[in-house]
Amino acid sequence: MDLALLRTFVTVHRAGSFTRAAALLGLSQPAVTSQIRTLERQLGRPLFLRQARGVTPTTIGDELAHKTAPHLDALVEITEAGLDEESLVRTLHLAGPPEFTAERALPALTALTREDGYGVALRATFGTAEDALEGLAAGHHDLAIATARPRGSLLTATPLCDEEHVLVAAPRWAARIGSGMLHRDAAPSLEKFPVVEVHESLPLVSRYWAAVFDARPAVPATVVVPDLRAVLACVASGAGLSVLPRYLAAPALESGEIVALLDPPVPPLRTYFLVVRTGTLALPHIARAHEWLLRAAVDWT
């Protein structure tokens, strides 16, 4: 049986779409359709059910994918290992949220770019979790960091780390709120204070309010800026209160530029996932970066 047909089949099975598989394989959509039909004729059984949006594997398709995918991934690993030894530099395309990628992921991966490292060149793209996962699925990135676990079999996610969120403000706002930490039932008393956020929907503040106060924020943001580092700068300058990742806020908290308004017994957390296209961990430069980030995340608090 032609291995190219099996490779196309596994890609379609993981992508759930002839069109998306074609983009990943560098083929035209008609070529992918033709290869799947050829394989179905050889097997004498349908492998996919065609639907208005994408395809769904039949039970025969699922069985074939389960049996063949690990072997095809192993062949890719063998082939790419040989290429990796001959090539001096392999480029890793990474996508993720700007703050976390800049402050944590990229510093952890720079060791792979050094002369005594593994000869990996880095190219980073910043964006939302949705942007990162869509770009990864389309083959634009090799590795994505996202705050949402993807669905389906095309992408494989591994929990990377948890991020603690803290409610913060400049000292002058904290003084107006009152001495000491706020209580869990203090949400109404915060409604008169301006809010700084990354989006009009108040994603971090809403998550914090729900987890800590069992309520929803009642006022819109006063300042909206799509970068948590800019949010931190605005909070430190006295623009209002906000919710920030503790790792990002820690230096300003230690220096007294901002203060934590509440210390809940169970602080709100957000999980980051390390996501790849299923099967691509057989590629050495992606596997190295994946392992490197997981090891670095052990020390991220």
Image: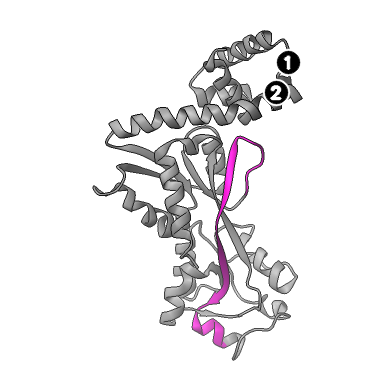
Q: Which residue is mark 2?
A: 61
Numbered circle sitting on residue 46:
1
Q: Is residue 293 left or right of residue 192?
A: left
Give SS at disc 1. Answer: loop
Residue sitting at the far left = 115
Residue 11 position within the rendered picture, expressed as x and y whole percent measured from the top left: 58, 26
Is residue 159 rendered magenta in the image? yes
Q: Residue at x 61, y 30 (%)?
A: 15
Q: Amino acid at mark 2?
A: Gly
Identify which residue is drawn at 61% across, 89% down. 178
Q: How far across and down, in percent of the image, does residue 288 sit?
A: 41, 45
Check whether the beta carbons of the residues at disc 1 and disc 2 lie within 8 A of each other. yes
Judge whether 75 appears above or below 160 on screen. Answer: above
Residue at x 54%, y 68% (from the top left corner): 244
Is 174 rendered above or below residue 239? below
Q: Which residues are magenta?
A: 149-175
Q: Nearer the viewer, residue 297 or 260?
A: 297
Foreground residue, 68 or 258? 68
User: Can you give x and y, in whole percent of width and height, for residue 221 in the image?
Assistant: 60, 65
Residue 216 relative to residue 298: left or right: right
Which quarter of the figure has residue 65?
A: top right
